[in-house]
């Protein structure tokens, strides 16, 4: 079991560029989540998905889009990156209630 | 708007001490309160969790105390060790149409000195 995997681990973008962060889980979890972590801000929810075909906005969705491709995969897209999106991004998955399992994170820098 | 407020921001204790981290919330609909531990360069990992129908839960050296009327909960680490040095996050969750989203506190950076 790999758990939750994220690619890439590191990325540097220029302002205005686009990219997709990939997340996959092999635990057959229904729910998947995207968070961003900034110093002194804790973890803030960007988007989440309770099941295939459903997504919902979290606390800080502006500038992002998501796709729940299937039960295993949940991707996060930045259409036009901005320096304010420099952060560490974590994907997580869970059964309906209870422990969320986090991936190792993607460290993104936007210059 | 921060739905879960966590304090202190940082904490230094000596080995064997009992660090205490506090969290407060406003939304009485929250019904699941986990604590996560995060080491540098890693994702958070669940440490211990409690539901509001109990006032205390212990797992090894870690204890959650929960005060429903005050809308507060805290983490105590007994006999703390240098290996406990990490960032700790409290959280609270509530059901929505899309599942159970966690609202995190801002985190407490704990350093346990030898």
Image (tube, coloured by chain):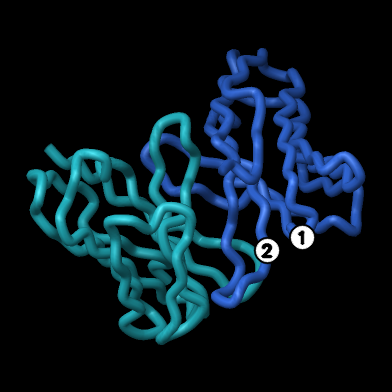
Q: Position of residue B54 (x, y in %)?
A: 90, 54
What colour denotes chain A?
A: cyan
Name the residue located 77 percent from the left edge and 43 percent from the top edge.
B60
Q: Is residue A64 above or below residue B60?
A: below
Name the residue located 47 percent from the left edge and 48 percent from the top edge.
A44
Q: Which mark is residue A26?
A: none
Instruction: Say what secondary structure mark 1 lies in.
Output: loop
Asked if residue A86 lies left or right of residue A29, the reply is: left
Quarter of the image holding residue B74?
Answer: top right
Say which residue label 2 marks. B94
Q: Is residue A66 above or below residue A45?
A: below
Number of residues whose C-alpha sits closer than 10 Å to that of mark 2, classed few (under 14), some (14–19) or many (20 or more): some
Which quadrant, please, contains the N terminus of chain A?
Answer: bottom left
Point out the tag, 2 or 1, that comes first from the N-terminus.
1
Say which residue label 1 marks. B29
Name the residue located 56 percent from the left edge and 34 percent from the top edge.
B107
Q: What chain is colored blue? A: B
Q: Are marks 2 and 1 on the same chain?
A: yes
Quarter of the image holding residue B29?
Answer: bottom right
Name the residue located 31 percent from the left edge and 82 percent from the top edge.
A69
Q: Position of residue B104 (x, y in %)?
A: 58, 46
Q: What is the chain identity of the residue bearing mark 1?
A: B
Disc 2 vs disc 1: Cβ atoms closer than 8 Å?
A: yes
């Amino acid at each position: 079991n790999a758990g939750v995997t994220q690619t890439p681990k590191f990325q540097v973008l220029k302002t205005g560029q686009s990219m997709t962060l990939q997340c996959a889980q092999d635990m057959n979890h229904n729910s998947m989540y995207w968070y961003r972590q900034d110093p002194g801000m804790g973890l803030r929810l960007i988007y989440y998905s309770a099941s295939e075909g459903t997504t919902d906005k979290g606390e800080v969705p502006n500038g992002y889009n998501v796709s729940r491709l299937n039960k295993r995969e949940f991707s996060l897209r930045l259409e036009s990156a901005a320096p304010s999106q420099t952060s560490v991004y974590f994907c997580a998955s869970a059964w309906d209630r209870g422990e969320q399992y986090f991936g190792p994170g993607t460290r993104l820098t936007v210059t | 708007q921060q739905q879960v407020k966590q304090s202190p921001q940082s904490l230094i204790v000596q080995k064997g001490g009992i660090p205490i981290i506090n969290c407060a919330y406003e939304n009485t609909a929250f019904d699941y309160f986990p604590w996560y531990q995060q080491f540098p360069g890693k994702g958070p990992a669940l440490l211990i969790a409690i539901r509001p129908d109990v006032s205390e839960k212990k797992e090894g050296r870690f204890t959650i105390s929960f005060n429903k009327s005050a809308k507060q909960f805290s983490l105590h680490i007994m006999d703390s060790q240098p290996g406990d040095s990490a960032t700790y996050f409290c959280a609270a969750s509530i059901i929505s149409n899309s599942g159970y989203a966690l609202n995190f506190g801002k985190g407490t950076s704990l350093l346990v000195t030898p």
